[in-house]
Image (cartoon, rainbow, N blue to C red):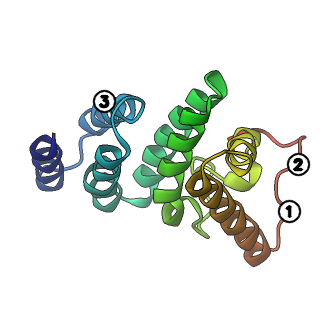
Amino acid sequence: MDVAIEVTAVLLSSISYDRDIISRTLSCTLCCAKDLSDSIISKIIVRIWFTILKSCDKGTESEVLHQIWDDLLSWHQRDQTESVSARVLLCLTALSDHLYSSETSQTRPDPRRSQRFFKAIQAGLTHKDSVTRKRALYLLTRCVALAEIKKEDVFTSEEPDT
């Protein structure tokens, strides 16, 4: 599996941007995120997702983040088990520097405005695993810090879920 991840990352970094290839790669790796071990998922995030995010412009980066964001939070919404909560929080924590950007865009996920995000955080804060609880607390802290920097409120129920 390690070789496949490395080959995919090298190929992605050497080809010019192709929306179809990126979308299919994300779709496949998001499926893997639901079944493979944490160590392999961590490698996929670092080698494949980060390669994709580094190689695209800001608009495309927003689309990629939104695809990952939507898939992970939809999965958590459908299957609110402890293992799903732990995996979703692992992925979101790894992507936190991208998610908590001070850049504003309609297509970029905004954790401060997402009810699904806060449900995942809530599940993480009450999780039996201490690492998952720490991830949830870290994400919540980053969310509040971003809201303070932008001088904006955190989620209210009237706002649309993104």
Q: Mark 1 points at which residue?
A: 153
Disc 3 is placed on an element classified as helix
Amino acid residing under circle 3 = Cys
Q: In which quarter of the image is residue 141?
A: bottom right
Q: Where is residue 51 in the image (x, y as percent from the top left)?
A: 27, 56
Mark 3 nearby-residue class (10 Å; few <14, some 14–19, many ≥20): few
Please tell me whether mark 1 or mark 3 is closer to you in this view.
3
Can you tell which mark lies on residue 28? 3
Kindly tell me whether residue 95 is visible in this rendering: no
Specify the quadrant that holds the C terminus: top right
Point out the tag, 2 or 3, that comes first from the N-terminus.
3
**Foreground residue, 1 or 11?**
1
Specify the quadrant that holds the N terminus: top left
Q: How far apart are marks 2 and 3 (CA)?
A: 33 Å
Amino acid residing under circle 2 = Thr
Mark 2 nearby-residue class (10 Å; few <14, some 14–19, many ≥20): few
- At a point 15% along the width and 46% down the height, the residue shown is 2
Residue 25 lies left or right of residue 90; in this view the side is: left
Q: Is label 1 in contact with label 3 (beta carbons under 8 Å)?
A: no
Question: Hey, which residue is sitting farthest bottom in the picture?
Answer: 149
Can you tell which mark lies on residue 76? none
Kindly tell me whether residue 14 is visible in this rendering: yes
Q: Mark 2 points at which residue?
A: 156
- At a point 25% along the width and 55% down the height, the residue shown is 47
Q: Distance between the residues labelled 1 and 3?
A: 35 Å
Q: Distance between the residues labelled 2 and 1?
A: 8 Å
Disc 2 is placed on an element classified as loop
Point out the tag, 1 or 3, that comes first from the N-terminus.
3
